[in-house]
Structure formats: C-alpha cells, structure tokens
Amino acid sequence: MIVVIAAVIICLIEGILLSKKAMKKEFITVCILLFVSVLIQLGKNFGIMTVPEIIEKLLEPVGKMYLKRL
Amino acid sequence: MEVMHLKEKEVISTNQYIWLLFCIITAHATLHVPRLLIFQAGRDCWLSLLLAWFLDVLLAIVYAYMGIRFPGQNMVQYSITILGKIAGSIVGFQFIALFLFISGALERGLSLVLKKAFFPDVPIEILLISAFIVIGYGTLKGVEIIGRVCEILGPIYLISSITLFVFLLPEVKIDYLKPQLESGLYPAISGTPVILSFIGICIMMGMFQPICNKIENAFIGKFTAVSLGVFVIITIAIGSIGVFGLHQSQNMITTSLDLARYIHIGNFFQRVEAIWMMIAVGATIVTSAVLIWAFSLGFSQILRLKSYKPLVIPSTLISFAFAVTSADNSIQLTNFIFYTLPILAIYVETGLEMFLFFAALITKKRG
C-alpha cells in the first residue's frame, strides 16, 4: 500500500515540477517507472509472480547444479 | 551513432572512483557474502577469493579498454554505439536493471540483519523507508556528492575492518584453518563464481569511467579498489573460520557481525558491533545510491532525456518495491543470493561485456 501512496505523491510533485519546465517526455518516463513500482507491489499483494520470483524459478536450478545444497 | 549527452556534467576524482568501488565491495562483505563463500569453498575460501580477484582484474582490463575505445561513453552508451539503437538499448538496459535489482536485494539483506540483530520490534518496512529516504536524497545530490562521502567513509571502513581483525587475532586458532585443499581444488573453483558475482558489481567502473577526471587511471583505480575489497573479505573469512571453526562459520548468517560481537579486551572494551553497524549501514546506503544513480542515468540515456534527475525518485521507489516485496525471511534471501544472483550477475557482468567487446572488435566501431 505504501508504494501506491508514494507513487501518487511522487507523480503529483514531479508532474507539477516537470510541467513547469515543459519536460513532457521526462514526465511520461516518470509515470511509467511509477507504474512499474505499483505493479510490483500489486503483483505481490494479489499473489502474482514478481520479477525476482520469475528469475529465481528460471535460474535457481542452474545454481543448484554446481553449488552445495544450503 | 550520435551519443546523447545530458545537461548534467559530473566529474569525480580518481580517489573518489577508488573509494566508491571499495564501498560497493564492502557493502557485500559486511552482509551474507563471506558466509556463503565459506559454505561453498570451506577452508579454501581464501583461494576462491584470490581466483575471483584475478578474474575480476582481467575483466577490469576489458572494461578499461572499452572505456578508452569509446571515450566519454559509459557502457549503456557504447552498447548503443556498437549494436544500434534497439539492440544496444536492450543490452544497456540489462546492465542497469541488474543495478536496480541488486540495490533492492542489498537493502533487503541489510534490513533483515538489522531487524534480527538490533531492532527486533521495529517493522522491516520502517527500516527500509528510513534507508530509502537517505538513498533517494543522496542520489538526487548526484554522484559527485556520493563520491565525496565515500572519500571520507572508505578509509574509515578500511581502517575499522583492519582494526577489528587485529583485535580478533589473539582468538584465531590456526588449527581450525587446516587441512587446506582437503577435497582438492573443486571447492575453491566452485566458490569463485559466487564471490566473483559480488565483487563483479564493480563493473560500475563502466559508468564511472567517463566521469572520472583521469580516464587513464580507470584500470589501476579498479585494481586498487578490488584488491583492498578482497583483502577485507579474506580477513573476515579467515577470521571467522579461525575463531568459530568451519562448521559454525558455515551456518552463521552474517559472519562479520558475529566476529565483531566476539571482540572483547578485558571487561572494558567490548560490544564493538556498533562499528560493524556503522560500516554496514553506511556502505550499503552509499552502494544503493550509486546503483540507483547508474540506473537513472542509463535509463535517461536510453530514452534520450534531457536530465536524469527526474528519474531518481521513481527509480528509488522501484528499488524500494523490490526490497519490500522480495524474500520474507533470511532463508529465502540467502537462497536467492546463493543460487540465483551469481548466475544472473555473471551473465550480465561478464557475458554481456565480453559480447560487446567482441562485437566492437568485429564491427571495428570506435567512439
């Protein structure tokens, strides 16, 4: 939840600052990055696999092939 | 390919460059890494470290060469120069995504250790929020400021680490370090990728090189930083086995913290884990700030933005989201750091850079 609230606040603050400087492309990028952070949080809340979990599922078996079992 | 230059022009000195890289290694050395290395390589961990140091120095030659071949360009920029806009952006993005990912994992690791050892009643989110506020502030100030901070903190960390080791020396039992090469060379060789993936984060030199005031010092700077960093990890690993024995060291979560707790001289000099905490918190915050700075800078260069500063806070929030949502406990995090991160890190740190190196040679492209 905290990520979602933070994303909204950052979007508002950065939006005002960037619109004053006419930096539209930067503002769109900021919104995309904030959206990604919200997605990561929501993915965890709704039990959807997050990016680290996907990477872990893919690479962990490779690591276990040559490393000792913890 | 035209290279996009941002309006911010930051410059760091060779000294700052060295201490920045040293702080990156120190951050990992204070957390889970020595224990994982001891777990994998046993008493031969020092040999793993020397092999990893050698390989990292070889890798540094490639990074330094690429920095000189493409002057004024970091690895994201020369990826685009070599491979073109689309393929280069994809390769460049993988470098910076790893940085962002590691910053989240690092802070998660630190907060888990701090909660367990020092603040058992504080919610982990509070520790993470406090850390990320400082990280975001530091990153907004830019790499020059972070570099100056490292120039002050780095030597303090080095001296503190050496002092801690000196205090431990009377407790080290040399018999615990024997026999060496008990199971042949395999434990040492298989431990090398584990440690290489962590000290390999010093590929950050590829981001620092274009802003270093003396580009020709890039290799010697990295060599110095990695040598100092490996020395610190060797002292922790050998100290841990020498004091606690192999089996106990393999089962500790943070060997360096337990070593610091073990130090006492009489009844008046003890509880020096506060020094450990100072090193761990400072080094991980500085490292995360640098990693997020690299992500923001690289991402703004891929998208050809005028400034990277607007991306700093959103990038910090993504890293925070990674930290909050990843591993629920130390076991999950250790599993991830031990089995997954080395493969991912070696693919990016070594695989992608060697690919760019050969692509540049074959296509005969220069900056």
Image (cartoon, coloured by chain):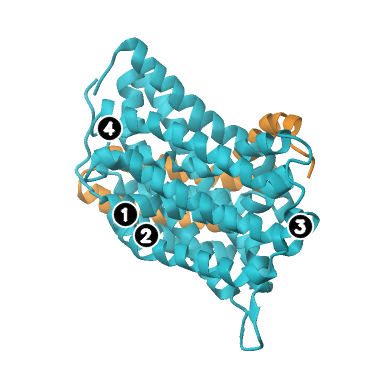
Chain colours: A orange, B cyan
Q: Label 4, secondary structure: give it.
A: loop
In the rendered image, the vertical position of residue B142 relative to residue B259, given as above or below: above
Nearest to viewer (mark 1 / mark 3): 3
* Disc 3 residue crowd, few under 14, some 14–19, many 20+, Cα 10 Å: some
Pointer 1 or 3: first along the chain: 1
Quadrant location of the N terminus of chain B? top left
The x and y percentages for residue B326 are 63, 48
In the rendered image, the vertical position of residue B75 relative to residue B323, given as above or below: above
* Disc 2 residue crowd, few under 14, some 14–19, many 20+, Cα 10 Å: many
Q: Label 3, secondary structure: give it.
A: helix
In the rendered image, the vertical position of residue A54 relative to residue B127, given as above or below: above
Q: Are marks 2 and 1 in contact (CB under 8 Å)?
A: yes
Q: Is residue B4 visible?
A: yes
Query: Mark 4 — on which chain does it sit?
Result: B
Pointer 2 or 1: first along the chain: 1
Q: Which residue is mark 3?
A: B176
* Disc 1 residue crowd, few under 14, some 14–19, many 20+, Cα 10 Å: many
Query: Mark 3 — on which chain does it sit?
Result: B
Q: Which residue is mark 4?
A: B73
User: How far is disc 4 from disc 3 in space, using C-alphas?
Assistant: 49 Å
Nearest to viewer (mark 4 / mark 3): 3
Nearest to viewer (mark 1 / mark 4): 1
Q: Residue B16, labelled with which disc?
A: 1
Pointer 3 or 2: first along the chain: 2
Quadrant location of the C terminus of chain B? top left
